Image (cartoon, coloured by chain):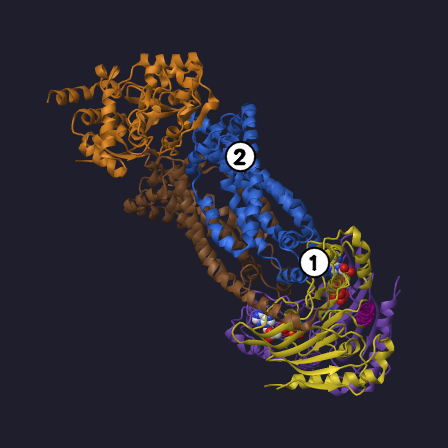
Chain colours: A yellow, B purple, C orange, D blue, E brown
Amino acid sequence: MTATTKTAPDSSGVVPFAARAPILSLKNIDKVFGRDVVALKGMSLDIRNGDFISLLGPSGCGKSTALRLIADLIHPTSGSIRWQVDKTPGALSVVFQEPSLMPWATVADNVWLPFRLQGKSRASVAGDIAEALELVGLENFHDAYPRELSGGMKMRVSIARALVTHPRIILMDEPFAALDEITRFKLNNDLLELKSKIGCTVVFVTHSVFESVFLSDRIVVMAARPGRVIHELHVNEPYPRSEEFRTSSEYVAHCRATSDALRDAMEEHI
Amino acid sequence: MTATTKTAPDSSGVVPFAARAPILSLKNIDKVFGRDVVALKGMSLDIRNGDFISLLGPSGCGKSTALRLIADLIHPTSGSIRWQVDKTPGALSVVFQEPSLMPWATVADNVWLPFRLQGKSRASVAGDIAEALELVGLENFHDAYPRELSGGMKMRVSIARALVTHPRIILMDEPFAALDEITRFKLNNDLLELKSKIGCTVVFVTHSVFESVFLSDRIVVMAARPGRVIHELHVNEPYPRSEEFRTSSEYVAHCRATSDALRDAMEEHI
Amino acid sequence: GGHLTEVTFGTNWVAQAEHGGYYQAIADGTYEACGLSVTIAPGGPQVNNRAQMLAGKIDFHMGGNLLQAFSAAKEGIPMKVVAAHFQKEPQVLLSHPGKASSFEDLKNLETLIIGDNGFQSFYQWMMADYGFDAEKRVPYTFNPAPFIANENSAQQGYITSEPFAIEREGGFAPDIWLLADAGFTTYATTVETMQSTIDESPEVVKCFVEGSAIGWANYLYGDPSAANALIQADNTDMSDEQIAFSIEKMKEYGIVDSGDALEAGIGAMTAETIEGFYNKMVEVGVVEAGLDIASIYSTEFSNTGVALGVKASLMSN
Amino acid sequence: MTIADPIAELPQIDEEEALRARRRRNEKVGRWVLPILVIALSIWLWDRIVVWNELPHYILPGPGRVLQALVEDWAILFDSLLVTLQITLGALAIAVVGGVGLAVLFTQSRWIEMSFFPYAVILQVTPVVSIAPLIFIYVDSRLAGLLICAWIVAFFPILSNTTMGLNSADHNLRDLFKVYGASRWQRLRFLQLPSALPYFLGGLRIAGGLSLIGAVVAEYVAGTGGIGSGLAFRILEAGYRLNIPRMFAALFLIAITGVFIYATLSFISHMALRKWHESAIKREV
Amino acid sequence: MTIADPIAELPQIDEEEALRARRRRNEKVGRWVLPILVIALSIWLWDRIVVWNELPHYILPGPGRVLQALVEDWAILFDSLLVTLQITLGALAIAVVGGVGLAVLFTQSRWIEMSFFPYAVILQVTPVVSIAPLIFIYVDSRLAGLLICAWIVAFFPILSNTTMGLNSADHNLRDLFKVYGASRWQRLRFLQLPSALPYFLGGLRIAGGLSLIGAVVAEYVAGTGGIGSGLAFRILEAGYRLNIPRMFAALFLIAITGVFIYATLSFISHMALRKWHESAIKREV
Ligand SMILES: Nc1ncnc2c1ncn2[C@@H]1O[C@H](COP(=O)(O)OP(=O)(O)OP(=O)(O)O)[C@@H](O)[C@H]1O
Ligand SMILES: Nc1ncnc2c1ncn2[C@@H]1O[C@H](COP(=O)(O)OP(=O)(O)OP(=O)(O)O)[C@@H](O)[C@H]1O
Ligand SMILES: [Mg+2]
Ligand SMILES: [Mg+2]
């Protein structure tokens, strides 16, 4: 079966970023774990500079696996991943599905990590760290240890750590799943703002149809067992997107289309 | 400030369970971590047999702390917790915010755990285990180890483990946060079905307004810093609730009321 | 025939020709003849058979020299030396050929390789009497390689053992300095037992001491092959040449049979020798004055001269 | 689960709360009183065993006699203790450096590990007594020789535990470091070493006692000429002179030193981990 | 990050892929070839040191001579090896039982731990040489005495590491067990022991070598009567007789035995953990 390309009703063909140079292309990737767990089958995906791509799909369909492939943390069983740009270290950052904080370091030290690995002293980036922590609402927790935080707070530290360096490419695996809706909305807006400010590329895993529509210009819908892409939707709505977009009829239409695609994915069995 | 009691527009006063005998009451609980982190302040809550109570509130407002207090895993700094019933072991089960699986045991062995602690052999409860795993869609993963599962799959194992014994009281801390919406809806329905079948009491932490309204008869809205109850809403809609309820106008009204309460909670600062 | 009393004799080293007399008495039935069934518990570098005797787990123990008996007197331990089978301390110092012209010269060498027991006994005397330096001493781990490697060293040894090994493997004959000749006039290879054993079963002590003396006479002057077989059974590495060398040296230096033993028989002790050694040690400050030395030895069993006749008849053959 | 009368239950639950408070209080007191009681009891038992069995002082001296020896010979014993302590701490220090250094080296590549770990094992199992002569043929400084001997005895637990710790770093964090393009050195410094800390400290606690043993053994095989006589020498001397109370006094000092080293290392370990590691943090309940 | 010409980049990336494959292949071969090479090299170096320095065979025999001794004296040495091995394995077995048993006891309550852990430390640091006579006074069987001596040397790492492991169980799982009303025994059996397994196995790897040392030391202090002569006796005897090649042959056997024990324990450890523990699972990449 091949991926079909649906376009939501209001697709007006607006390309929000000027230079959409290719960054990375995955071609016909298979990933098999162990002997017979086919996590991904024949996945192809082109990522261009400035894209905001959401991966959407049922639990266990290979979203995290795809993200790890892109981050070069695992290698495909077959198929090829082509980087079209120089991967300078520091250009990439990730938010894993688990917070993955260093338990021995305070919140601020955890957020400092990407800078530290670039050789920057904590004092020289104290402003950036404070700003990132304020973004996620943890300005009062600089000196707390991870074990003293709630689940959602840990995840927010992880988000702050990913954003603090203003990276060119951000990979996020369900970053907002543990957060309440209001914080989530706020962080959605903040993320889009950051994106338009620094022009980064985002690959975003989410379970929320609403979130994926609000944030992305492309939504990749995947099905499970074996994990594969079954729909790719384009949300051709201009950035920046404001809160009003959430109540617009275009938004609702896109959501409905995406929901249908997701339902498709759930019902797909080979 | 005192907790106000809002009632959603369509409260028709239906009491879905006959015998609403009190199980537990928290009275004026304070919980301070370390020197000065006030996780809970003056929290009071009565839980009656058959209740489905949702705790809703911003990240870090003390929902997990409240759940741990109820489970008798931590003790209040002041205030009192009164059990009005005999706490026989095995009557209670929990789903923590993290999956908390035993990494050395297979999925089926993890689900076996609560039975095992009751002294039941694996063979004698194989049917229950299989049923629970089927409920969460993991019928093909009996022999997998936790590390081979995706984030959502781990969480589903944890859910299966909590439900497999059909306990009288279930405490769940954002059990469905890592799941896609369709699976989530399905599990919502399954949970309600189980509840009506065995008549258990559920205390449920969630970030989703929709989920809380769909599932609960009482929604406790909490605010952060310090963590406290600021609203208690009643969703006086009869159980069992079907999928149609999700599209009913009552549902929307309840959601709106809950959203408003949540917004209140976000804006609350002492 | 009849009923035999089981006793155990703890030696201070693995089985070797220096224990020949005891093995001889077992092999030819001398102990059995007076009613003892003797088991020998071999010692080793870190085996503490004396503690076993103090605790009553074994009956007799082979003492090195008299210094430790003096310690027992000081500590009030009811232990007695009942025989001394070596009239002379067979302990020597070895040095590379020509490196020292006298015993006293040895103290000018770089290192002295002395075992822990040696350090606690004769080295104390060497320091007090000759001015040897404690800091030059390094422990002897019963491996002569460090000595062979370092020309400016001396090491301890038994006249009957180390010179043989060093000559064979090291390729040179070391100079030998007998402590006994330098003034260390103690008896050696003593038999120690607890006072209670003497009180409760003097016949056992008598049998063991006399049997041992006869054993030694037979071992040195008769046919030692049966005893040697027992030694080699207990210590499979003991070579025939080594045994032959040891017996030869024991005879050559009169280790077993000289001095007091010539008149009173093998194993004999005299108060003069013991008191004389004690006084010398007091003089140089190795032991303290005023110990009740008479309480730690008994010549009651050792000086009966039983071995004299055996020796005479063997010599006349 | 039976639904009980709500009112009747109240007193019982208050009792529970009071019980918990009482238990907490007891625990606080007990944590100091009990060990002291056990020590007192064991000393009393020791005394009784000696008295009941009429054990002579040259087999097992009673605690009184040992204490007397300790007091009377304090000057000698204390000097020896200092010597032993010096070697112990020196050996522990190089065991830490050597153990952690080797562990770091071994975790740099499976090749290095497979190639050189066997030699570490060989060092561990080689009887010091047998190779001490070889060491002293080639090492001139006596102190250096002693430290090498004691080090051989003590380094392995640190090496083994630290290696294990370095390999136990959380894989998500490893991945994170990879994504951020961390150098090998950075990964070691900021990820693996902190992850290995609890394991290292566990090894350190074992090595503390071993370096004390190592110091004693080294003295046995090497003597301490030049740097004074340590406790091993005192034990040997007292044993040879049948001065058993003094021997036990020296043994007692070794035991106390061992406990003290262990307690100190445990305390250091606790301070280093209490903020974050499962085994050390005090959970608030 | 500079945007490069997409076409020009392709070959370079394929190269990268090939490079990775090559590295994987190399690694597979290297993991066996390199250790063998290192062994060969070190034996060659040993030989050269002996030849270059004209070391006489009674100081350090060359590998050839040691091999010769090994072959010629194989019958004697092999018998001794069996004796030593018997004590080693016996001691390891009781070290496991004793170490884990004590660890379990100590984690039952802080009181017990505070009260009795010091005695474990005292046992660890007491020189076996000094207390061996006491042991042999009260223990009649020589084999039992030997085992006790070797056990004293070996048990502590297991105790210490297992204690640490039992205390490191995930606190969420602890809480879960509490909620489910697990008994103390169930918590131990189903939660703490599995959690402690990696730590225990780490301690076991240390104790493996130590029990070999313990067996050697025990033989030194206990003499040889009764159950045949082990390798310690061979070393001593050969050293005394200046049969240094044989001494090294015996040392070599001890070293090989140590490496073999370590490798076996590592393998067991790997098999027990490879399904789930960070330090052992092979990540799929
Ligand atoms: N290390 C592993 N070993 C074996 N199987 C694995 C491993 N990692 C993932 N899998 C399998 O690969 C499949 C995809 O997993 P992945 O984590 O990518 O899912 P996901 O889409 O992120 O799901 P979720 O939304 O639940 O996080 C799952 O079936 C999982 O069981
Ligand atoms: N062990 C602890 N030590 C110190 N502070 C703690 C501890 N556990 C929780 N806290 C604090 O208590 C507050 C409430 O935490 P809790 O986990 O109950 O929040 P929550 O409502 O569950 O949040 P979330 O939705 O993010 O899970 C937080 O501010 C947190 O920092
Ligand atoms: Mg995932
Ligand atoms: Mg929480």
Chain letter of disc 1 in the image: D
Label 2 secondary element: helix
Q: Which mark is residue D16?
A: 1
Task: Using residue A236 as the reference point, say whether residue A32 is left or right of it.
Answer: left
Give the quarter of the image for residue E240: top left
- Residue sitting at 50 percent across and 74 percent down? B123
Task: Using residue C151 as the reference point, say whether residue B82 is left or right of it.
Answer: right
Q: Which mark is residue A232?
A: none
Label 1 secondary element: helix
Please check the rendered image and state whether residue C170 is part of the magenta-colored stretch, yes or no. no
**A268, above or below D23, in the image:** below
Task: Using residue C22 as the reference point, say whether residue B179 is left or right of it.
Answer: right
Q: Which secondary structure class fits the magenta region best?
A: helix
Quadrant into which the N terminus of chain E falls: bottom right
Q: Earlier in the sequence, mark 2 or mark 1?
A: 1
**C127, above or below B22, in the image:** above
Q: Which residue is mark 2?
A: D254
Chain letter of disc 2 in the image: D
Task: Using residue A211 as the reference point, say whether residue C279 is left or right of it.
Answer: left
Q: Position of residue B129 (x, y in %)?
A: 57, 76
Q: Position of residue A191 (x, y in %)?
A: 80, 69
**C122, above or below A169, in the image:** above
- Residue sitting at 21 percent across and 33 percent down? C227
**Label 1, ligand 2: CB separation under 8 Å:** no
